[in-house]
Image (spheres, rainbow, N blue to C red):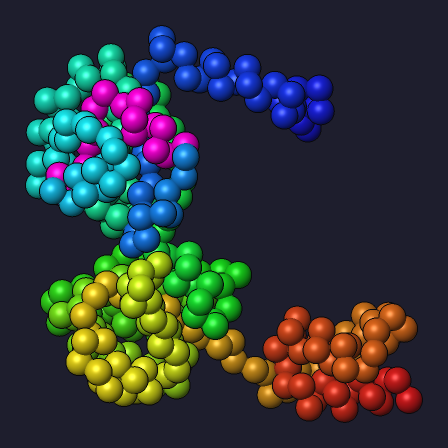
């Protein structure tokens, strides 16, 4: 059990910052950057980048646009999947002796972006690592989808090869929670064809250009969403995040409700008939009409 005496309250916050930000404590900061709108960056993220002695990024030309917009000049170290091990070895001394920042081209680093080997190296070598949270396309895509998101499964990028695509879609078909993934513009039509074939009745949402002027969200089943996108050729250009509704639980045609009589009677004493039916249906997955008839008979 956690003691309230050991809880660090707001009155101690300044002291914590002084300790963490001390010049003696060097660290690697994972900093989230805007996914489109350049105003979507926190003051803390800006200050962390300003204070950094080394800035690690994917594409220096891309990151320079952000830094120039912020009025920050830094030497950038390029990190990709194919050179990550080599770069980590080259800057290993800097990771120990200098404040370092990791940014991606857009959004939160490491989410389908390079950086895992870098973080793994720091953890194994007791180098301080912290995260400056911020923009990500995953959460707004889920929020705007109109699909339940109390549980969801993120699967990265839509695959390239036919065999992997088939397995990818079949897994989504059997997944009972909402699925969210990225898809590139040149794979979007292929993705929609597979979703229409395997999940014709499943709700989907496609978000493009989030936080930008041309932000759009298309909702419906795969065929309808494909038709919406086809109305304008430029709709297939941009960056996309797809959200797919989870597989519905099968309703049970018949279960002996008599075994639940005691619990149902307790519910009847506290809730309306409609509420009791809804509660029992959700807990047992027995069809509502069967539950209604049984509850009604008990109530009478």
- 250 in relation to 75, above or below: below
Residue occupying image coordinates x 35% and y 59%: 211
The quadrant of the image that shows the N terminus is top right
Q: Number of labelled discs?
A: 0
Q: Position of residue 294 (x, y in %)?
A: 78, 87
- 159 in relation to 63, above or below: below
Figure quadrant of residue 194: bottom left
> Which sits in the foreground, 268 or 40?
40
Q: Position of residue 171 (x, y in %)?
A: 32, 68
Magenta region includes residue 295 = no
Q: Position of residue 260 (x, y in %)?
A: 77, 74
Figure quadrant of residue 229: bottom left
Residue occupying image coordinates x 71% and y 19%: 5
> Which sits in the foreground, 68 or 13?
68
Q: Position of residue 7 (x, y in %)?
A: 65, 23
From where the camera sits, is residue 10 visible?
A: yes
**Farthest-out residue, top:** 24
Q: Is residue 192 left or right of residue 89?
A: right
Residue occupying image coordinates x 31% and y 64%: 213
Q: Is residue 30 left or right of residue 297?
A: left
> Which sits in the foreground, 209 or 180?
209
From where the camera sits, is residue 171 visible?
A: no
Residue occupying image coordinates x 64% and y 81%: 286
The quadrant of the image that shows the C terminus is bottom right
Chain part drawn in magenta: 44-60
Figure quadrant of residue 240: bottom left
> Which sits in the foreground, 91 or 247?
91
């Amino acid at each position: 059990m956690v003691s309230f005496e050991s809880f660090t309250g707001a009155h101690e916050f300044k002291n914590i910052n002084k300790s963490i930000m001390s010049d003696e404590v060097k660290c690697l900061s994972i900093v989230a950057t805007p996914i489109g709108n350049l105003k979507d960056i926190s003051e803390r993220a800006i200050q962390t980048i300003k204070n950094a002695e080394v800035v690690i990024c994917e594409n220096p030309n891309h990151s320079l646009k952000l830094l120039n917009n912020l009025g920050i000049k830094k030497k950038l170290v390029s990190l990709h999947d194919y050179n990550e091990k080599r770069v980590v070895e080259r800057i290993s001394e800097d990771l120990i002796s200098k404040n370092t920042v990791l940014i991606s081209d857009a959004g939160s680093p490491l989410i389908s972006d390079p950086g895992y080997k870098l973080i793994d190296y720091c953890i194994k070598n007791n180098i301080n690592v912290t995260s400056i949270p911020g923009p990500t396309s995953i959460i707004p895509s889920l929020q705007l989808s109109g699909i339940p998101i109390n549980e969801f499964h993120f699967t990265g990028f839509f695959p390239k090869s036919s065999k992997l695509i088939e397995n990818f879609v079949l897994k989504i078909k059997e997944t009972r929670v909402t699925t969210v993934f990225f898809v590139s513009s040149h794979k979007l039509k292929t993705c929609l064809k597979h979703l229409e074939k395997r999940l014709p009745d499943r709700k989907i949402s496609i978000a493009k250009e989030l936080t930008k002027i041309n932000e759009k969200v298309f909702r419906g089943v795969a065929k309808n969403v494909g038709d919406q996108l086809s109305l304008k050729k430029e709709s297939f250009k941009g960056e996309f995040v797809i959200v797919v509704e989870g597989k519905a639980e099968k309703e049970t045609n018949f279960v002996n409700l008599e075994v639940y009589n005691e619990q149902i009677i307790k519910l009847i004493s506290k809730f309306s008939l409609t509420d009791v039916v809804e509660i029992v249906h959700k807990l047992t997955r027995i069809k509502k009409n069967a539950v209604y008839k049984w509850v009604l008979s008990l109530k009478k």
